[in-house]
């Protein structure tokens, strides 16, 4: 939001500076100059009013998006929690089964290691 405000102020000051330079460098009578300055001032006022309205519209739009996001999140959060809970309940038996298979595999590996160790001892003793 600060960048948008800085940008808007830059445009505003650039416009004022350009208008002032154009008015001061153009040869004309003082009456014409006064009219041009008055026109420029009125134009500047209209532009400032437009910028202010646009900034207010942006602010309101952001507030609406934040409000809608909060509402949507508050509605979806319980559904997401329920889905996660259901998923965890669904996969629990599979997790236990996998853990049991892993335990069996570990026991088989330990048994094979023991057998291999015994065979190596026998071979070293017979040598």
Image (cartoon, rainbow, N blue to C red):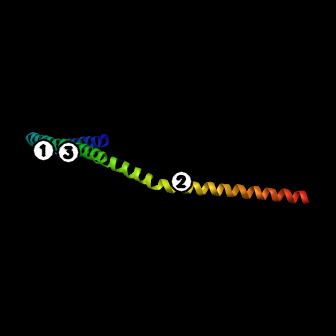
Query: Residue 99 at what x, y percent from top left?
Result: 57, 54
**Numbered badge on residue 51:** none
Above or below: residue 52 compared with residue 104: above
Query: Which one is in front in this view, the residue at disc 1 or the one at disc 3?
Result: 3
SS for callout 1: loop
Q: Which residue is drawn at 53% across and 53% down?
A: 96
Cα separation, mark 1 vs mark 3, equals 40 Å
| Residue 102: x %, y % from top left | 61, 56
Q: Give the answer, above or below, for where 118 lies relative to 30.
A: below
How many angstroms separate mark 2 from mark 1 (CA)?
93 Å
Residue at 76%, 55% in the rendered image: 114
- Picture disc at residue 57: 3
Disc 1: CA contacts within 10 A as few (<14), some (14-19) or many (>=20):
few
Please tell me which residue lies in front, 70 or 29: 70
Tell me the element at label 3: helix
> In the visual, does 23 lie left or right of 108?
left
The nearer-to-camera label among 3 and 2 is 2
Q: Of callouts 1 and 3, which one flags the residue occurring earlier in the amino acid sequence?
A: 1
Q: Which mark is residue 96?
A: 2
Q: Name the residue under label 1.
A: 28
**SS of the residue under disc 2:** helix
Q: How crowded is mark 3: few (under 14 residues within 10 Å), some or many (20 or more)?
A: few
Residue 10 point in image, percent of width and height: 27, 42
């Amino acid at each position: 939001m600060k960048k948008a405000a800085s940008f808007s102020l830059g445009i505003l000051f650039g416009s004022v500076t350009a208008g002032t330079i154009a008015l001061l460098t153009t040869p004309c009578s003082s009456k014409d100059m006064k009219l041009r300055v008055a026109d420029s001032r009125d134009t500047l006022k209209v532009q400032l009013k437009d910028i202010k309205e646009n900034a207010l519209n942006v602010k309101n739009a952001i507030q609406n998006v934040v409000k809608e996001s909060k509402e949507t999140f508050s509605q979806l959060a319980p559904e997401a929690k329920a889905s996660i809970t259901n998923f965890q309940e669904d996969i629990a038996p599979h997790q236990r089964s996998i853990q049991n298979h892993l335990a069996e595999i570990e026991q088989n590996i330990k048994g094979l290691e023991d057998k291999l160790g015994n065979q190596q001892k026998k071979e070293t003793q017979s040598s």
